[in-house]
Amino acid sequence: MDEQAPDLPLLGEVAIITGAANGIGRGIALAFAEAGADIVVADIDTRAGAVTVSNITEKGRKGLLVETDIRKDADLDRLVEKTLDQFGRIDILVNNAGINAPGGLLGVSREDLHSVFDTDLIGPFILTQRVAREMVRLHIAGRVICISSIHSVVAHYHPYYSAAKIGIERLVIDAALELAPFSIRVNGIRPGGIQIRGEIALDSPEIVSPEVPLGKRRGLPDEIASLALFLVSNRARYITGTTVTIDGGLSLLSFSSINSRDNILAEQARMGIPAPVENSSLIVNVIPK
């Protein structure tokens, strides 16, 4: 379909996006709608989800809100059934919904532990299986995107969250291998600190984050959405089984690199190389999705 309408690469396609009521999921939903897709918003937040659907219809596309608790198999079955009843096909699945829990290793409860794994790993696994079966049955060259986190590779005192995100990246690899013969592609996105609350704009002081090497700021949902759109488009037709990091270089930092920075800058100053311009002294905590 890309060849028929290059400015609308998803024209005529249908995408299910979990957690699409807010944040990254909402950004992806709107970007896909602008690219021509009809969108199924799957979320437990029906009030915000209805706003997302309204925004989708304003762009001239069809939107469907399905109240979905990804921890419940019955909800996942109903999500797929309603999508097929409404649109007759599923071309794209974005596993975006995710949660964390308090307490760290020493404090997390068993109930919260199960909730994190059910939401961040088991639910996406079951939904991917359910949707992929329909793609195979309907002979659709589908695409699946799983939203991970840099905390699959960078520790942050929530081992259950990190473990779930490591699991989702393994799902990407193995599902891509199994589904490749059916022309179904599976890829992941590994975001760093993304501004999903408050003012979401490049010129907002709320996104300033000096810890981030590139731009000294948090990322924006539409930047994740642009990557997701590329990965589901025909331009990425030979990409499957990979997870792409998008974090402004945040996950590249290490204790030794931070310690070395001042020494390198001093050496470069002696060579006449100008120091990089710091655009703000405001410190904002980086809390990746």
Image (cartoon, helix red, strand yellow):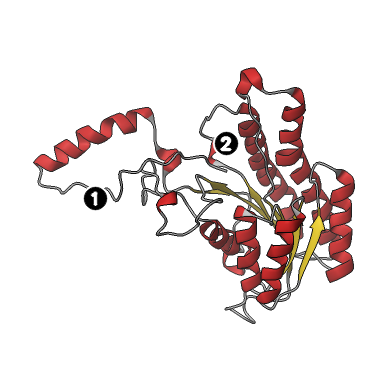
Q: Residue under circle 2?
A: 152
Whether 159 is drawn above or below 208: the answer is above
Residue 277: assigned label? 1
Furthest toward the bottom, the residue is 4
Task: Give the x, y percent position of residue 82.
Answer: 87, 62
- Label 1 SS: loop
> Is residue 183 in sight in this rendering?
no
Which amino acid does the dot numbered 2 rest on?
Ser
Amino acid type, callout 1: Val
| The N terminus, quarter of image | bottom right
Q: What is the CA distance from the residue labelled 1 to the residue labelled 2?
A: 31 Å
Report crowding for label 2: few under 14, some 14 to 19, many 20 or more residues within 10 A (C-alpha): some
Q: Residue at image x 57%, y 60%?
A: 225
N-terminal-most mark, 1 or 2: 2
Residue occupying the point 90% across, 47% down: 74
The image quadrant where one finds the C terminus is: top right
Above or below residue 116? Residue 76 is below
Q: Is residue 97 left or right of residue 201?
A: right
Residue 117's disc number: none
Q: Residue at x 63, y 38 (%)?
A: 165
Q: Position of residue 44 (x, y in %)?
A: 77, 50
* Left or right of 73 in this view: 211: left
Label 2 SS: helix
Q: Quadrant of residue 57?
A: bottom right
* Relative side of 61 to 211, left or right: right
